[in-house]
Amino acid sequence: MDVHFFAAARAAAGTAQTTVQHHQLSSPSLGALIDVLGRDFEGKNTGAMGLADVLTRCSFLVDGVSTTDLTTSLENAHRVDVLPPFAGG
């Protein structure tokens, strides 16, 4: 599945996008994806936060549906957007 990072998540990951294969996950869940991403990307954003720290503050779109529930199934997911809190409006 394609994972797209935005704002602080993009800065911490050091990339705008990555691909994660379903078989890389310990379970087909958002929580398992977060574990893989936090482990695989160890960069820091401008606030000196690693991606694992940024991910704890994010919301996610799974194929366009908003969620923060770590048990959300990714079994058939094609795209996950990682959305940190945004300032302004």
Image (spheres, helix red, strand yellow):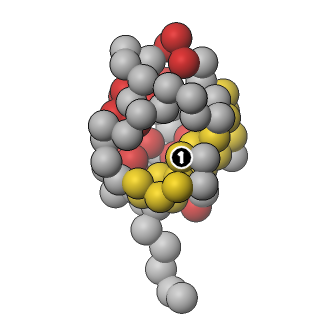
* Quarter location, residue 76: top right
Q: Residue at x 31, y 48 (%)?
A: 69
Left or right, residue 84 beside residue 7: left
Q: Where is mark 1, residue-wise?
A: 62
Graded by Cα atoms within 10 Å as few (under 14), some (14 to 19) or many (20 or more), the crowding at tag 1 reads many
In the rendered image, residue 28, in percent from the top left (x then y), is placed at 42, 23
Q: Residue at x 50, y 26 (%)?
A: 75
* Quarter location, residue 30: top left
Q: Residue at x 37, y 19 (%)?
A: 27
Decide if residue 9 is in sight here: no
**Which amino acid, by three-letter code, is at mark 1?**
Val
Decide if residue 40 is in sight here: yes
Name the image quarter holding the N terminus.
top right
In the rendered image, residue 84, in percent from the top left (x then y), is placed at 46, 61
Name the image quarter holding the C terminus.
bottom right
Up-down: is 46 above or below 17? below
Up-down: is 87 above or below 73? below
In the rendered image, residue 73, in percent from the top left (x then y), is placed at 42, 34
Closer-to-camera residue (87/12): 87
In the rendered image, residue 61, in percent from the top left (x then y), is placed at 53, 53
Check the image and name the residue furthest to the bottom: 89
Left or right, residue 40 beside residue 71: right
Closer-to-camera residue (15/77): 77
Check the image and name the residue furthest to the top: 23
Up-down: is 84 above or below 10? below
Q: Residue at x 60, y 47 (%)?
A: 63
The secondary structure type at the circle numbered 1 is strand
